[in-house]
Structure formats: structure tokens, C-alpha cells
Amino acid sequence: MDVEGETTTPRRFVPDARYDAVVVGAGPYGLSAAAHLIGRGLHVAVYGKTLELWRQHMPRGMLLRSQWWATNLSDPGRRYTFRRFFRESRRKPGYPVPLDTFLEYALWFQRHAVPDVDETYVTSIEHRDGNFLLTLADGRRVESAAVVMAIGIRHYAHRPDEFRGLPPGFAVHSSELRDLEPFRGKRVVVIGGGQSAVEYAALLHEVGATVDLVPRRPIVWLERDRMGERGVLEQIRAPDNGIGPGWKNWVLEHVPFLFYHLPRDRKDRALAWYSSAWAADWLRDRIANKVTVHEGQSVSSSEVEDGRVDITLSDGARIRADHLVLGTGYKVDIDRLPMISPSLRAAIKDEKGIPLLGRSFESTVPGLYFVGVTSLPMFGPMYRFVLGCRSMAPRVARAIARQRRNRRGRALATEPKLERAVSPDRSQVGRRVHPIPSDEAGTGSWTQRVLIARRR
């Protein structure tokens, strides 16, 4: 963490700019939150590289598991939807959605709804006197009444302990891979059995690698997508939803904040079920008889010898590979967010690195919000999908706008009472008189009096 930045900041902080809200991160959640904040007339800044995770840390050829109509970013008037993008770009919607198509849509959304993204990283966030003080990578410092942390998933990449002792380059997390061409002709072991791991296995095979897939549990294949084919009775039994058919999914989508009120044990059971190793049906043929799958196995030991990785599986099988790809998912832990200063981190209450959030995604530090996957343990599995932007963004924007009104109300309440200048007989002098503070009429400057009058 940026301890040096915190200790060397001058006592008198002179910001380069002041905002009602700063959004840290410019992915789907950050852009959606910013669009709603701007829509409420707030003074907003967005920092971070636009769609960086999607553009630089997801593999070419990737397909989205979600339906296109469930992958809209959110703006107040729902003007910049995927449907409108398809219409204006003359593209045809389909399933599954290619990553490149989603990127084109999301960048189109950003240009229209949030045109002023500043692609500078935030290196430090402090909290002083009720405001947030942010230091940027280029040395600028800004002040904001509220901060929305929409940092995505990359900081939370989970690397199991058994692989941390391997030299750099031999075991890489899937979030670090964009170009798979260097793996052509290599033998690669992919660890994991969820959508990400299975899709990486398929893509690696398709660029010419020899691939072993090692899922701890048998892969759970999702049913073939039958959108538009299901009859009325099927729809009644299991209605279509953005994250899959079924009444449980319907509740998550249409009553999105019910999950927040569930007891912790029920939340944990639901999250464990939704985080199972599921993979889309359209991946099945891409790995069948092409990728060696070691279902129900784990890695007992791994070591590097003669420039290759020797792996022993729990059933005793041995694999000699060139690389390991860890499709082992993500684990929320705000201790891994380097921009949060130690003093601010100490003020955030958490459970094992998961911030405790209020109903509006606000942490225990007033004005500090966590959205996206960071909020998933509190708000439910929908917030691992782009679909969650639809319910998150208006709620966060509404809360910040309310706080802004309250702050202004308190500021006005603490200002000196004003009275009109009057003549000795108590009648108003002239047709129009500038109000002045009664306790400063003789000592305050004319400029101070006018400024106070304008604020009133």
C-alpha cells in the first residue's frame, strides 16, 4: 500500500479539483454508476483505463455466457442498450456473444453516456474531515465527497497456495492471458472446471497446444440454450432470466435486493451453489476428445525441472508440462487493493476481507461504496454478471445524491443568519437590497457579504 504517499501528504491539502463523486474503475459497473451519477447532475470524475480487464486480460476468441439482452450497461434513460447498438451498427444479435462485439458495444456506451473518462490510475485514497483525498499516478490530487470503488475482479485473482512456490512464468492466472499464440506447440495444464477454465482449455487447444484440464469436481454442464423454443408450461415452471431459467434466478433478477436481507448462513449456501464449476453447453464439443480431462482430481505436487513443470495428481498420475494456467477464479479481499491507504483501510469494517455494506452498497466509511464483484458476498451472485449494473447503478447514484443534498442542507444551517438592511423606521431601504450577515455588517468585506448572499 502507498504508505509513503500517506505520510508525505502536506497537512494542508490543496486539491487540483473537487467532485461530488469519484468513480475508481471504468468497467461495466464503473461506467454504469457514472452514467447515473451524471444523470443526477452531480460533478463526477471517472479514473481508470476504459474496460481494461475486458480489453487486455481476456483471451481473443472468448464468448460471453450471458444473453446479449442481459448484458446491457445501465444509463438513466436506458438509451444506450445493446438493442440500439445492434440497430445502429447494423449487426445481428445472436448467442453466444463474441467478446469483440461486447467490447464494441461497451465502448459505444462509454462514448455516449460517460464521455470524459480519465484513464489515469488512482494510487492512493485517504479519508479526512468527511471527504476523500485521492492521489493519481501523474501526481494530481483531487477531493471528493464520495468514492465508488468499481475496480473489477483482477486484483482478486485467486492463486492456490500449492502453486505459489513455482518460478514466475510457469504458473499464470487466466486473468493474465490475452494472447494465447505463444502456447502453440506447448503442453499446458489448466487448473479448474468452471466456465473460464474450460473455455481457456478449448482456446488453447484451438491455437495448437496440447491441453490437460484438471477440475477438482466433475464439470457441471449447463443445459443447451433454448431461448425462444420453450413452451408456455416450461416458462411457468422455470421462467427465462438473464442468468438462466428458474424461479430462483427470477427472484435474483427482479427482486435484486432480497438476497441482501437473508441470514449469513443462507447467503453462504446460495453463493456456494452458484459458484459451482459450471460451463456452457456450447463448450462441450470444443473439448470432447480434444482435451484430456482429469475430473475429480487435484494437484498433489508440482516442481520445475529442466525448464518444465512436473505435476502429480491426486490419483498418482504424472504430467510433464510447459506451463500451468490457473482458472481458479477470484476471491474478494480488500486488503489486496493497493490504492486504499492504511488509515482508510482501518476504518472499513469487514469479514475476512469482505467489506460490510449497507443497503446502498455503502461501506462503514460514509461516502465510500463498493460495487461489482466486491459486493457479491453481501448482495448475491447477480453482481458477478453485467446484468447487476441495472439495479446497482441507480441505487448508488440515488444514495450519493441524497448525501449531497444533506451536506448542503447542513452547510446552509450552519451559516450566519441573514437579514435585510433596513432604515431607522424598520422599512426596507430601496426596492432591492443585498442581504448581509447581521453579525458582520461592520467588519466583513463587501465581497464576503455578496458571496454569502449568493449562497443563500
Image (cartoon, rainbow, N blue to C red):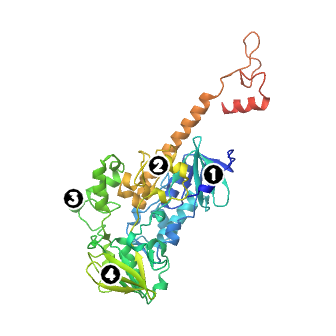
Most extreme residue toward the bottom is 185
State which quarter of the image contains the N terminus: bottom right
Q: Which mark is residue 394?
A: 2
Q: Nearer the viewer, mark 2 or mark 1?
A: 1
Front residue of 90 and 45: 45
Is label 2 in a helix, a strand or a loop?
helix
x then y, percent, for residue 113: 55, 57
Mark 3 or 4, closer to the camera? 4
349 vs 58: above or below: above
User: In the image, 228: left or right of 390?
Assistant: left
Q: Earlier in the sequence, mark 3 or mark 4?
A: 3
Q: Amino acid at mark 4?
A: Thr
In the image, 340: left or right of 359? Answer: right
- Please provide percent x and percent y for residue 372: 44, 57
Q: Tag 3: residue type?
A: Arg
Query: Label 4, label 1: how many angstroms apart (C-alpha)?
Result: 48 Å
Residue type at mark 1: give it. Thr
Total tally of numbered discs in the picture: 4
> Distance from label 3 to label 2 (Cα)?
31 Å
Mark 1 falls on what kind of element?
Answer: helix
Taking the spot 74% from the left edge, 29% from the top edge, the residue there is: 449
Q: Which residue is mark 3?
A: 237
Mark 2 near mark 1, Cβ–Cβ under 8 Å? no
Q: Which one is earlier in the sequence, the residue at label 2 or at label 1? A: 1
Tell whether 53 sits left or right of 243: right
Q: CA distance from mark 3 to mark 1?
A: 60 Å
Q: Badge 2: how crowded within 10 Å, few (<14), some, or many (20+)? A: many
Q: Find numbered disc 3 in the image and state the secondary structure of the residue it sits on.
A: helix
Residue 7 numbered mark, or none: 1
Tell me whether the residue at label 3 lies in contact with that at label 4, contact meaning CB atoms closer than 8 angstroms.
no
Label at residue 312: 4
